[in-house]
Image (spheres, coloured by chain):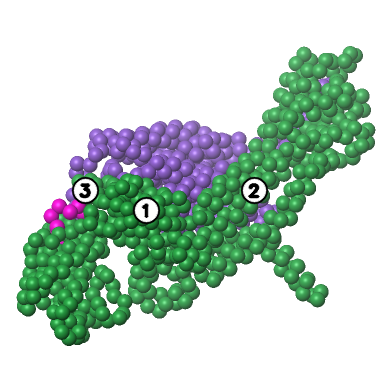
Chain colours: A purple, B green
Amino acid sequence: MNTVNLAQGLPVNETLSTYSDLAYRSAFGLYVLALVASLIYYAGFRVAKVTKSSRNLVGAGGPGLTESTSLTDTGDEDRESAGSVRWARIAQLFIIIAFLFQAAALILRGVATGRFPWGNMYEFILATTLLGVGAGLIFLRKPALQVAWPFVLVPVLILLFFGGTNLYSEAAPVVPALQSYWLPIHVSIISLGSAILLISGVASIMYLIRVWQPQGQETGWSSGLSRPLPHADTLDRLAYRTAVIAFPIYSVGILLGAVWAEGAWGRFWGWDPKETASFVSWVLYAGYLHARATSGWGPKKAAWINLAGFAVLIFNLFFINIVVSGLHSYAGLN
Amino acid sequence: MAPVTAFLRNSWRTLTAMRTALILLFLLAVAAIPGALLPQRSLNQGNVNQYIADNGWLGEFFDKLQLFDVFSSWWFTAVYVLLFISLVGCLTPRSIDLVKQLKAPPPLAPRNLARLPHHAAYRTTATPEQAADQVQKSLKGWRVRRNNGDGRVSGSIELSAERGYAREVGNIVFHFGLLFLLIAFAAGKFVYAEGMRVIIANEESPAFCNTTPSAYDSFRAGLLVDGTDLAPFCIKVEDFRTDYLPNGQAEMFTSNIRFSEEVTTTDPATWEPYTLQVNHPLRIGGTRVYLQGHGFAPTFTVTFPNGETRTDTVQWQPTDLLTFLSSGIMRFDPPAGMYPDIDDRLEQQIAIQGLFAPTASFDGNILSSRFPRMDDPAVAIDVYQGNAGLDNGGAQSIFSLDPDLMESGALERRARVNLMPGESTTLPDGTEVRFDGADEFINIQVSEDPTQIWVGVFAAVMVGGLVLSLMVRRRRIWARIIVDEAQATRVDLGGLAKTDRSGWGREFDDLRDRLATIATATPVLPPSDTASSRGDDPDASWKDNIR
C-alpha cells in the first residue's frame, strides 16, 4: 500500500556514497585477511622456555645502581611467540590498511551526505568498529598482546557484516530529531567509550580463558586456545586500564545524551529502553571498577562483571533498536 | 536493650559494607532490565494494554509484579533506597578518613625496603645529607617527610613521600555528586509538571495560555504540584510547515508561534515571535515549550434537514507515520430546537468515522496515502446516525466510536463514501455531510522541572570527581640513606602503588634512573679503589645489567 519512493533525488552525492560503500567492502575483505593471518600466528604460537632473568644486580661497590627489583612488572607483555612472528606482522599490516579503508568509508559517507556520518545503525556500526580497531591498535601494541587480535576482529567482522547487510541504509539526510549539534558530540563520545570498552571486554574474555587454563598447565582440547595467551595479570591489567579510560568517556556520553534529550524529547531522562539499558551497563561497569578495587572480590569475579557490562553494552548499542521500539529507533528499521 | 543495639549495629555494618553495596548495585542493574525490555506505562499505556491482552495470564502476572511500572515499583524503590543508605553509610566514614589523611604526614619507611614490590639501591660518593637532599629535590609534587635518624632504622636518614591524595578526594566528590544527583532527580518527581496540548495550526485557532492544567489535553505532575502555580504565559500558533524529502522522510518540522510572558488579552500579533522546531524548544524562564508531534485535522460541515449547518475541525490520529494516513471521528449534535423532545435529539446525532489521506491513492475504493504532505487529500468515511455517546455520561475516545453503540443498534450506518475536498454525501433523511478539507495540528508539550538544573550541576560534579579519582594514582616512595660497610653512602628506594598499579613500574624506574644518574655524576672523592674499577662510564655498567 505504501508506495513510498526510496532513494530518489535525495540531496546526497551518489558517486561519493558509492565509493564509501566500496571502501567499506574493501575494509571488510582486508579484515578477513587480517583475521586469517592473526589466526595463523595464534595457531603457530610457540611458548618460549622460561629463563628467569635475574634483575638483582650486585654492584662492585662504586657509585651507581646496585640493586633493582620489580614484582609488578614481569616483562610478560614483551613476550612474543618463540616461533615465527611474521604472521603477526602481516596481520598488523592488514589491520592498518583495513583501518584506513574503513576510515575512508566513514569520511566519504560524511562528505556524500554533508553531515556527521553517524545518523543510523549502519553508520554507527561503521564508526564504532573503526574506533574499536583504533583502540586495539593503541592498546594492543605490546608483543604479547598480538594474540588478542582474533578476539577483536571476530566481533568487529560480525558487526560489519550485519551493518553491511541487514542494517545497511542508503546515504540520506537524517530525521529532524537528529538534526542537532549534539549528534556529533553525543554519538561520537558514546562510540569512543564503547570502542575502548570493546577492548576491555575482549581482555576479560581472554583473562577468563587464561584463568581457566593457567599458564604452563594448559590441558585438553582447549589448550591450543589458551596457550598463546599472556599471563592472567597482564590481561587483567589491560581490561582494567582500558575500562578506567573508557568509563568516564562513556559516562560523559550518557550525560550529554541526557542534555540532548532535554532539548529534543522534552525531558532529560525518561527511561526509554535505550536509556534504561545504558543505565544498566553503566551500573555494571561501576560495579566492575568497585569489585576490582575491593579486596576480597577476586579479579575473576570482577572479570565476570566486566563481561556482563560488556554484554549489555553490545546489546544496547546494536540490538535493542531491533528488539524494542523506543525513541532511539531511527535505524531505518521501522 | 543490648541485643537490639547489637542487631542495629550489625545491620548497619552489613548494609554499609562494600560487598553489600556491590550486590545492591548489581540488583539495581538487574531490576532495571524489565524496564528496557517490557513496555512501560509511563512511556506508553497503549503498548502495555496490548501486551497484557496478547499474553493473557502471563501479562496479568507481570502486571501484579509491577513489571510494567518498573521505575515506580516497590522493589525498584527498595533497592534504590537501600543503595542510597549504603552510600551515605560508606561515604561518611571515608570522608572523615580523608580529612585525617590530608592532615597526616606520610607513614614511616618500613624496616625492609627490599620487600616492597619496587625496590632499588645505589651508592653515591655524596654525603648522606647530600644524597637525601638529592632524593628530596627530585620528589617535586610529593608530600615528603624527612626523618634525620629518628626513623625505624637508627643512624639513617629516611624519607617518606606520598602523592595522589586527589584520588580519594575525587572518589568522595564523585560519590557525593551521585548522591545529590539522585536526590535532585527524586525531588524532580515531586515538583515537575508536563502538559500536552493539540493546537490546530491556522490563523483562526485561539491563543493558548498556561493558566491551569485543564487547558491541556493531558497533564502529568508531581505530588507537590496542584496546578495553581503554573508559569503564566500565552502562545499563539500561527502556522506549521513540514519539509519532506522526495522519499517521504521528514526533513524539518517548523511552526511559527508568538508568545507573551504573561497572561494577557492583547492582540497576539503584537507578541514576540519564535520559530519552534524539533531540537529548538522555546524557553520562557524555567518553562520549556516543545514541538512534539503533528498530524491532520479534517473539517466537515453537516447541513441538517432544516438548513442549519454545523462545522467542526477535529484532530485525527496518524496511524501510519510514513504516509500519515490518519484515522478519527467527528460527532455532531443536531441544532437546539430541531427536536422538541430531548430523547429524539439524542437519537439524531451524526457521527463520522474514517480515514484521512494527505495524498490520496485509491486501490478500487480502498483509500491509502502515498505521501505525508497534504498534496491531494481525501477521506474514506462511514456516516452514522443515532446516539453517538456524546451525552452518555461516560468517557469517550476522541479517535474512535464505541463499538458497543453500533452493535446495540444505538448508532446506525447511513453512508460509506470516499470524499475529496468540497464533495458531500446526503443521508436518507436529507442531512448533508460535506468534507471541506483539512488543517494541520501540532502537539505542544509544556514542561517545568526546577530540579533539572541541579541534576545537571551534580552530574558535572560527578564526572569531575570520577575523572580525578580514575586518573590520579596514589603512590608512596621511601628512601633510606645509610653509610654502608665500605663507608660509602647507600640509598635504598622502595615504591608502592596504593590502588592502581598501571604505569607505576615505569614511573619508579624513571625516578630510580634519574637518581642513579645524579649519584654517579657526583664528583668521585679520591681515593676510592672501588670507584675506579667501574671504568669511565659507570652509567653503562648498570644499564647493561637491567633488561
Q: Which mark is residue B290?
A: 1
- Amino acid carrying label 3: it is Asn
Query: Which of the 4 image quarters holds residue A67?
Result: top right
Q: Which residue is drawn at 89% across and 13% down?
A: B526
> On screen, A5 above or below B121?
below
Say which label, 2 or 3, has the lower sequence index.
2
Q: Which residue range is magenta in the image?
A: B368-378
In what element is the residue under mark 2? Answer: helix
Residue B79 visible? The answer is yes
Residue A169 image position (x, y, % from top left): 29, 47
Q: Residue B477 carries which label?
A: none
Residues behind callouts 2 and 1 on a single chain: yes
> On screen, A49 above or below B99?
above
Residue B515 image position (x, y, % from top left): 76, 25
- Amino acid carrying label 2: it is Val
Which of pointers 2 and 1 indicates the residue nearer the eye? 1
Q: Mark 3 lies on which chain?
A: B
Crowding near the residue tagged with mark 1, few <14, some 14–19, many ≥20 C-alpha atoms within 10 Å? many
Residue B322 image position (x, y, % from top left): 24, 55
Crowding near the residue tagged with mark 2, few <14, some 14–19, many ≥20 C-alpha atoms within 10 Å? many
Q: Nearer the viewer, residue A193 or B433?
A: B433
Q: Which residue is drawn at 71% across and 68% down?
A: B11
Q: Name the residue under label 3.
A: B247
Quadrant housing the N terminus of chain B: bottom right
Residues behind callouts 2 and 3 on a single chain: yes
